[in-house]
Image: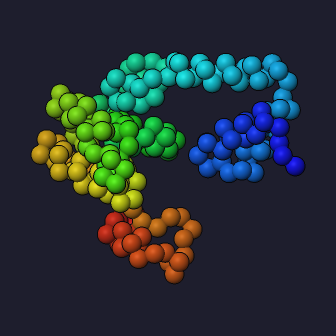
Amino acid sequence: MKYTKPLLKLIEEFQKFPGIGPKSAERMAFHILNQDMQNIEDLSRIILEAKTQIKRCSVCQNLSANDPCEICVNLSRDKKMICVVSEPKDLLAIEKTNEYKGLYHVLGGLISPLDGVGPENLTIKELLSRVSKNNLSEIIIALDTSTEGEATTLYLHRIFSPVCDKVTRLGFGLPVGTELEYADELTLTRALENRCEIK
């Protein structure tokens, strides 16, 4: 059976979302059609408000309705530390741990020559400006362990190690619950390199 054209278009739009396949897109489309008109109008309004009100913070490049964002203006944050992440979703992942109390900088991607993304396409100049204006105690590079993430990490380390005493990266190792025999060689190598004293 072929879907009617408006339903097919709705399914196709949902399939554009990351991680949404045809079956999930169908479920979402049918869920929308089963809602009453008020719920759909509310959802439409919320999407439009989010798109028009949320912008990049002029300081850290995070997404926020305020400029500067809530983290940048928070007086309890440690202004001597900046954690560099690729995207706002990475910032949120770190915030959920409740362990890091410093500031952030969002690059807006990773260096990827194959995709035409060079250092000039990221917010590295803005980060360099922040670092030169503030006497930082540490820059934490918290990027993916992909090839692009590693290339970006090395590039940032080369640029910032002369202007900041301490440039660190996140520790790597074995995820909780991993059996050693199933861990790949790179993960085990990183786990050995980042071993720490038992306390």
| Residue nearest the observer in this picture, 27 or 69 | 27
* In this rendering, position of residue 165 left or right of residue 72: left
Measuring from the top left, give residue 71's x and y in whole percent.
41, 27
Residue 191 visible at all: yes
Q: Which residue lies furthest to the left in this view?
A: 162
Residue 98 visible at all: no
Residue in view at x 57 percent, y 23 percent: 50
Measuring from the top left, give residue 73's x and y in whole percent.
38, 21
Q: Which colour scheme is used?
A: rainbow
| Residue nearest the observer in this picture, 131 or 38 | 38
Vertical relation: 190 (above or below) 11? below
* Quarter occupied by residue 128: top left
* Quarter occupied by residue 5: top right
* Quarter occupied by residue 15: top right
Please give the count of numbered marks on the rendered protein. 0
Vertical relation: 14 (above or below) 35? below
Measuring from the top left, give residue 179's x and y in whole percent.
54, 76
Q: Which residue lies furthest to the bottom in this view?
A: 181
Residue in view at x 63 percent, y 24 percent: 47
| Residue nearest the observer in this picture, 69 or 110 | 110
Residue in view at x 39 percent, y 24 percent: 57
Measuring from the top left, give residue 72's x and y in whole percent.
37, 25
Residue in view at x 38 percent, y 43 percent: 109
- Quadrant where the C terminus lies? bottom left
* In this rendering, position of residue 133 left or right of residue 188: left
* In this rendering, position of residue 68 left or right of residue 118: right
